[in-house]
Image: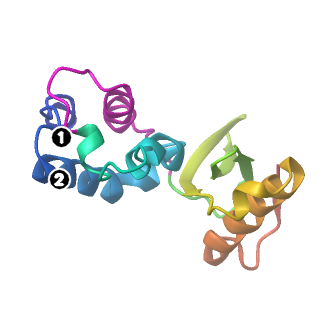
Amino acid sequence: KVEAVTQFPRLLTVKALQEFLGMVNFYHRFIPRAAQLMQPFCESPAGVPRHVSFLEPHSSCSPFADTKAALAQATMLAHTSATASIAINSDASDYAVGAVYKQWVGGAWLPLAFFSRQLRANERKYSTFDRELLGLYLAIRHFGFLLEGRHFNAF
């Protein structure tokens, strides 16, 4: 499966772009900072259809290459232990929030799942503190079914 990702052809057609985005969206839970990596695919210059900006035959398209590399090197996730301490780390940038749900096993934090989401236009206007707090809130809401009835740390 890794070879299929690394050998994915350049985005020369709208169909190729759709296939690539579908593949990334299917595996986004295993990619740290998925929303941040996908952000360039969701924006386009004024007056240019969104899909046209990535249909460039001669560019190694940094967002495309970065996303492909992240997908190929997706973190191997651990299995949940009922007795291990768990925590959520969240972070926010100017245009996305993300979090990792992890557990403390054998003296190290092991990732169990990832979450990321792009910020809406009005959320991008929030202060840094508010964006960080929003990221933590969204992460707790996203991982709520895993956190219910357990003590956890939030960073």
Judging depth in this view, the residue of 76 and 93 nearest the camera is: 93
The image shows residue 80 at horizontal and vertical percentages of 56, 58
Crowding at label 2, few (<14), some or many (≥20) Cα neighbours within 10 Å?
some
State if disc 2 and disc 1 touch (CB < 8 Å): no
Amino acid carrying label 1: it is Lys
- Left or right, 141 with respect to 11, comes to right
Above or below, comparing residue 86 to residue 38 in the picture? below
Q: Which SS class for mark 1? A: loop
Which quarter of the image is occupied by the N terminus?
top left
Q: Which mark is residue 1?
A: 1
Q: Is residue 75 magenta?
A: yes
Mark 1 vs mark 2: give the one in front: 2
Cα distance in 3D space between marks 1 and 2: 15 Å
Amino acid carrying label 2: it is Glu
To which quarter of the image does residue 7 belong?
Answer: top left
Crowding at label 1, few (<14), some or many (≥20) Cα neighbours within 10 Å?
few
To which quarter of the image does residue 68 belong?
Answer: top left
The image shows residue 141 at horizontal and vertical percentages of 68, 74
The image shows residue 36 at horizontal and vertical percentages of 53, 43
Q: Is residue 140 visible?
A: yes
Q: Which SS class for mark 2? A: helix
Count of picture labels: 2
- Name the residue rendered at 72%, 47% in the picture: 92
Q: Which mark is residue 147?
A: none
Q: Which residues are magenta?
A: 55-78
Q: Which residue is mark 2?
A: 19
The image shows residue 42 at horizontal and vertical percentages of 42, 52
Which badge, 1 or 2, comes first in the chain's sequence?
1
Colour setting: rainbow
- Name the residue rendered at 26%, 50% in the picture: 51
Judging depth in this view, the residue of 6 and 50 nearest the camera is: 50
Q: Is residue 64 magenta?
A: yes
